[in-house]
Image (spheres, rainbow, N blue to C red):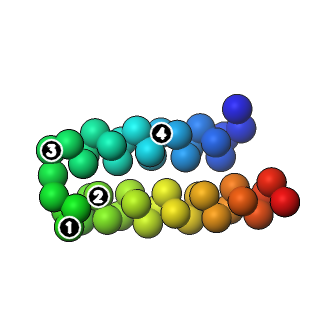
Amino acid sequence: MTNLENNIENLRNELYKLLDANKLTNIKIVTISQRLDELIVEYSKYKL
């Protein structure tokens, strides 16, 4: 697994944990979600 894949997986896991205890509008959830989106776009470009 690449560093990028590890980062995506770690953020995804952190996001799921936060979603269990917080509302979707929580700033930490929004920030992590945005970062996860950025990494997924980067990963998609890398895989092409």
Mark 4 vs mark 3, foreground winner is 3
Residue 29 in the image, given as x and y percentages of width and height: 29, 58
Q: Secondary structure at mark 2?
A: helix
Image quadrant where one finds the N terminus: top right
What amino acid type is highlighted by mark number 2? Ile
Mark 4 to mark 3 CA distance (whole Å): 18 Å
Q: Which residue is mark 3?
A: 21
What amino acid type is highlighted by mark number 1? Thr
Mark 1 to mark 3 CA distance (whole Å): 12 Å
Mark 1 to mark 2 CA distance (whole Å): 7 Å
- The numbered disc on residue 10 is 4
Mark 1 vs mark 4, foreground winner is 1
- Compared with 8, 35 (above or below) is below
Q: Which residue is mark 1?
A: 25
Residue 45 in the image, given as x and y percentages of width and height: 76, 63
Q: Which residue is mark 2?
A: 29
